[in-house]
Image (spheres, grey):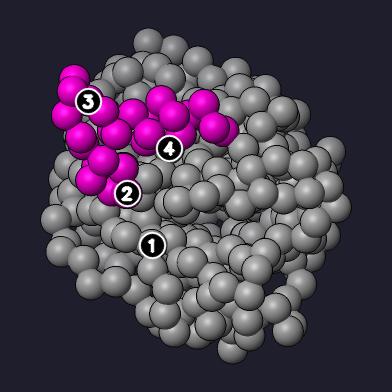
């Protein structure tokens, strides 16, 4: 479910003005997250609407991964899987003789790849007992015994000790990302495992993640899904439009819909970043418009990198990349009149994300874009549960 929140004006919008004085959009070559927030980012993180909390429970979150269709989608995602196969099997020298911890292992596909690459011991950590039992059957079916690949039911936060008296691992890996990189993400679990068990100088697979945004035009989607409420079987349902536009939209969008450059708003170094770098973040950005058009949404996607590899491996989920199960996420702006932009026009804004509880999967998201006129910027709030 998703709690709708009206876009608002107010003190929080003033932080955009402060950001404009010192804002520089993170570039692809910028240092990964790990620095303190600026005054503008701190101010933007302060004001959030009062919302009733009826988010999904942790059990619901993890049980959603019990549906085999979810795992089928991931296993059939050739872009994601080929990247992991290349990162692991083409770098077998990093895995040979190593102890590997696979966090959120699911049915164990990454664990099996690690075994194939020559790992001495692979610990497949998974919270759902049904997946653990099925993963064990898959491993045995492929001739891999528990002495090499051992499934453990638990989480990085609850597991008291590793099997076989192990105290450290050489590699922590996992396919932890979710939509918008962060929604339903198991990054927190991966970082807990890193901090508890990864040996000094150990490796993270993947070891870097980036989040990008761009201005997008999609009048057709607005007409079909939002303007539609003006007349529904002869009735006026227009009160539904504003709440509907607070829901992030997961879809595959066309490159032709992009209006601007694609600044990076989050750059995570998985070797040293913290959970708050991802789930308590605010980042200014600046988009240069590449053509004339109307801004209907801010589009987001991510990139996953394995920079530790001999030849760095990566995959992207943007509209110009081959399709993945992650698609892209659009945040449609609840504006009465979409902003019209021209070629080479610069549009500056700020994106903030917070996750208020580890036990729930919801995200609060806030976006503000400067106005072309002297009007106070409009702030758009989204809740994803």
How dense is the environment of label 3, judged by Cα within 10 Å: few (below 14), some, or many (20 and up)?
A: few
Q: CA distance from mark 3 to mark 4?
A: 21 Å
Q: Assess whether mark 4 and mark 1 are in contact (beta carbons under 8 angstroms).
A: no
Q: CA distance from mark 1 to mark 2?
A: 8 Å
Residue under label 3: 232
Q: Quadrant of the N terminus?
A: top left
Boundaries of the magenta span = 218-244
The mark that comes first in sequence, 1 or 3, is 1
The mark that comes first in sequence, 1 or 4, is 1
Q: Is 100 left, or right, of 373 in this rendering?
A: left
Discs 2/3, front: 3
Q: Position of residue 123 (x, y in %)?
A: 41, 41
Q: Assess whether mark 2 and mark 1 are in contact (beta carbons under 8 angstroms).
A: yes
Q: Main secondary structure of the magenta part?
A: helix
Q: Is 136 left, or right, of 283 in this rendering?
A: left
The mark that comes first in sequence, 1 or 2, is 1
Discs 2/4, front: 2
Residue 249 tag number: 4
Q: CA distance from mark 2 to mark 4?
A: 14 Å
Q: Position of residue 362 (x, y in %)?
A: 30, 54
- SS class, disc 3: loop
Q: Position of residue 231 (x, y in %)?
A: 26, 28
Discs 3/4, front: 3
Question: Does residue 210 lie above or below 293 as drawn?
Answer: below
Residue under label 2: 242
Residue 235 shown in magenta = yes
Residue visible at 46% across and 24% down in the picture: 74
Residue under label 1: 7
How dense is the environment of label 4, judged by Cα within 10 Å: few (below 14), some, or many (20 and up)?
A: some
Question: Does residue 303 lie above or below 34 as drawn?
Answer: above
């Amino acid at each position: 479910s998703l709690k709708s929140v009206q876009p608002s004006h107010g003190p929080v919008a003033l932080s955009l003005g402060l950001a404009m004085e010192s804002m520089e959009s993170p570039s692809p070559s910028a240092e990964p997250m790990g620095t303190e927030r600026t005054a503008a980012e701190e101010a933007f993180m302060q004001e959030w609407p009062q919302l009733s909390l009826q988010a999904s429970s942790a059990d619901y979150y993890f049980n959603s991964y019990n549906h085999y269709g979810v795992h089928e989608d991931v296993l059939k995602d050739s872009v994601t899987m080929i990247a992991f196969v290349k990162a692991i099997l083409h770098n077998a020298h990093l895995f040979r003789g190593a102890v590997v911890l696979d966090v959120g292992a699911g049915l164990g596909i990454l664990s099996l790849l690690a075994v194939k690459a020559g790992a001495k011991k692979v610990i497949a950590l998974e919270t759902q007992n049904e997946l653990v039992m099925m993963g064990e059957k898959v491993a045995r079916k492929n001739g891999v015994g528990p002495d090499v690949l051992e499934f453990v039911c638990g989480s990085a936060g609850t597991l008291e000790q590793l099997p076989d008296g192990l105290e450290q691992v050489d590699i922590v890996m996992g396919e932890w990302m979710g939509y918008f990189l962060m929604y339903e993400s198991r990054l927190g679990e991966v970082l807990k495992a890193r901090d508890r068990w990864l040996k000094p100088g150990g490796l993270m697979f993947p070891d870097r993640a980036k989040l990008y945004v761009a201005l997008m035009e999609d009048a057709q989607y607005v007409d079909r899904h939002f303007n539609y409420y003006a007349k529904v079987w002869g009735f006026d349902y227009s009160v539904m439009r504003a709440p509907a536009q607070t829901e992030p939209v997961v879809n595959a969008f066309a490159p032709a819909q992009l209006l601007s450059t694609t600044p990076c708003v989050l750059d995570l170094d998985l070797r040293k970043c913290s959970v708050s770098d991802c789930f308590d973040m605010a980042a200014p950005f600046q988009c240069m418009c590449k053509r004339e058009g109307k801004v209907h949404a801010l589009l987001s996607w991510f990139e996953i990198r394995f920079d530790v590899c001999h030849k760095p491996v990566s995959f992207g989920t943007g509209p110009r990349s081959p399709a993945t199960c992650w698609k892209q996420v659009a945040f449609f702006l609840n504006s009465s009149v979409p902003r019209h932009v021209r070629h080479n026009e610069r549009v500056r804004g700020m994106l903030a994300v917070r996750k208020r509880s580890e036990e729930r999967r919801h995200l609060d998201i806030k976006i503000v874009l400067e106005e072309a006129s002297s009007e106070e910027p409009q702030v758009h709030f989204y809740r994803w549960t």
